[in-house]
Image (spheres, rainbow, N blue to C red):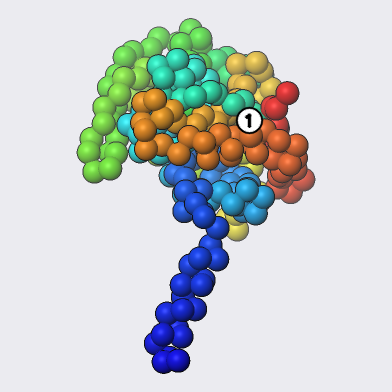
Amino acid sequence: MHKTQLFGGLLLAMTLAVPAGAADKVIKMSTTTSTQDSGLLDVLLPALEKDTGIQVKVIAKGTGAAIRDGVDGNVDAIFVHDTAREEKFVADGYGTKRYGVMHNDFIVVGPAADPAKVKGTPEGAQALQKIAAAKQPFVSRGDDSGTHAKEQDLWKKSGVAIEDATSSMDKDGRKVEFKTVQPANATAWYLSVGQGMGKTLTITDEKQGYTLADRGTYIKYKYGREVPVNLEILSEGGEQLANPYGFIPVSQAKHPQAKTAVAEEMAQWLMSAKGQQLIAGYSLHGKPLFFGDAK
């Protein structure tokens, strides 16, 4: 047999050896930056592929942008943390079901010197009120993420005078505008950076200011990097700071090309004993980053 024919035969055999439909088990998922920045996906996705054959192409961005990816049909699933917007996404027919996969919490972090005297304040709104009263630097993600949405909610509850504003960010080479609220007349101390959580923590560290962060990303940047951020947890534990995460398959009713069945299989794996065990077992320096929510 000619060598070319032999090689061609081997190549054909290898191709046929790939399980039928394997390519159909590659899905795109748009997710909040905290699932990636914290390192959680580095644990979950290899185990998911080993157990199910599902491969996930991750697009990490703010929750608002991730949800828009689902609305636009650019992905097969979203994994985000803004319950109200997640429920609306499902109610509007873009998602099949919200799976409450896990939670951690938001925290207010800042310099150890704590010039705003925030330390020991359990509720986030009260912590922001103290920062505003002291006119100490506060760095906002300003990116329409779940963290940014929580921050806006806390400002509304803080009693601090707020004002409406319009912010913008780049999405796939085009400018996207969105409405936001922020402290009024605060240009001297309030900085909106339009960045993910990791970059926001770095900027906050440089300015020795305060910010609202998810605990998972903070722990990664505090304990999981060669040069840690010099920021301390100053406000934590209050009900206002709860941070639940939801996984939602994109519905084929809105986007026929969506691989909804594969995304549903991923959802079931995340909610399984194996998935929940991996989530609960993920820690850095003995500090858990997330807690499973499957009932």
- Tell me where residue 83 appears, x and y as whole percent: 53, 20
Q: Horizontal placement of 178 versus 284: left or right?
A: left
Front residue (pair 278, 136)? 278
Q: Horizontal placement of 287 versus 73: left or right?
A: right
Residue 21 seen: yes
Q: Residue at x 62, y 25 (%)?
A: 100
Element type where label 1 sits in the image: strand
Front residue (pair 141, 6)? 6
- Tell me where residue 122 appears, x and y as whole percent: 66, 19
Q: Residue furthest bottom?
A: 2
Identify residue type, mark 1. Val
- Tell me where residue 72 appears, x and y as whole percent: 32, 31
- Tell me where residue 60 appears, x and y as whole percent: 45, 43
Q: Residue at x 69, y 27 (%)?
A: 293
Front residue (pair 120, 84)? 84
Q: Residue at x 67, y 50 (%)?
A: 51
**Mark 1 lies on residue:** 101
